[in-house]
Amino acid sequence: MFKRIGKRGADRGEVADSPRRGGGGAELAHASFTVLDTELTGLNRKKDEIVAIGAVKIRNFQIEIGRHFHSYIRPRRLDPTTATLVHRITPEQLRQAPPLESVLPGFFSFVGDDIIVGHFIGMDMDFISRAAKSMRLATPANHLVDTMRLAAIYKKLVLGRYHESSSSASGEFNLRRLTKEFDIPSFNAHDALEDALQTAYLFLFLCKKVATRGVVTLADYRRAGQGLHWAAM
């Protein structure tokens, strides 16, 4: 489930969307997933911080609405203006929130051995892994699935309209844009739990679509996603 950070550690930059190899033969339809989202003070991996984590569970391609994780997080450097403007998190919510050191162990326990799903999951996992490293915690080594990559697979295999030259510049893989394009139920943006739920709906939609083209296991997902590129913004 997790790996212990040694003294040397690893500065991997963006985390790949399937770091654990092997064990990719099980069908996705029968797997267990934790779909997560983080809210950040910014995208600078060296200075920005996590201010919220939200996650929901999927079992047998069903969202378990009653099982979820959500916590605001008090950053070390409190800049309430940024959080309020971008994420609608009030300064008081941040001041009263627990520090990440108190939140992360419980979040890891919630995730367990699940496959972790997220939209542009490399960014979320990089911030989480760096934070765990700084706390000398074990970091996640779970299988990862990126719904952005899954959307690219769907557009290529099912719709036949993936074009690297345009998609890499147009931002067509933004979560909200995909939600509208595929007519998926929409939830509030910039809320970690609702973004996780939004991603879960997108994930289930895409999994069922790509299964019609033989993408039914993690190994299939990895093979189908090789060489695809996209842009989130």
Image (spheres, helix red, strand yellow):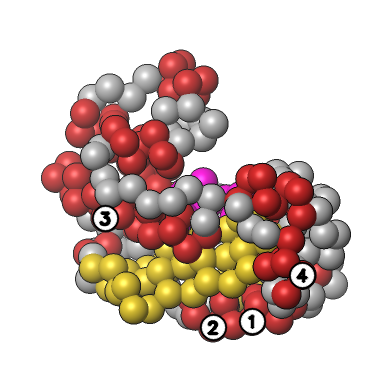
Task: Depth check: give the residue in front, 222 or 104.
Answer: 104
**Camera sees residue 118:** yes
Kind of element beneath mark 2: helix
Q: Is residue 182 left or right of residue 95?
A: left
Span highlighted in magenta in the image: 118-124
**Callout 2: 10 Å neighbours few (<14), some, many (20+)?**
few
Q: Quadrant of residue 228?
A: top left
N-term-proximal mark, 2 vs 3:
2
Task: Give me the C-alpha separation between circle 1 and circle 3.
Answer: 27 Å
Q: How far from the left and from the top, in percent, is residue 147?
A: 40, 48
Is residue 122 on the magenta stretch? yes
Amino acid type assigned to the residue bearing label 4 in the image: Arg
Label of residue 109 in the image: 2
**Callout 3: 10 Å neighbours few (<14), some, many (20+)?**
some
Task: Depth check: give the residue in front, 162 or 219.
Answer: 162
Q: How far from the left and from the top, in percent, is residue 155?
A: 29, 31
Q: How far from the left and from the top, in percent, is residue 109?
A: 54, 83
Task: Give me the C-alpha separation between circle 4 and circle 1.
Answer: 20 Å
Q: Which residue is mark 1?
A: 105
**Callout 4: 10 Å neighbours few (<14), some, many (20+)?**
some
N-term-proximal mark, 4 vs 3:
4
Closer to the camera: disc 4 or disc 3?
4
Task: Give me the C-alpha separation between circle 1 and circle 2.
Answer: 6 Å
Q: Which residue is mark 3?
A: 204
Q: Are marks 1 and 2 in contact (CB under 8 Å)?
A: yes
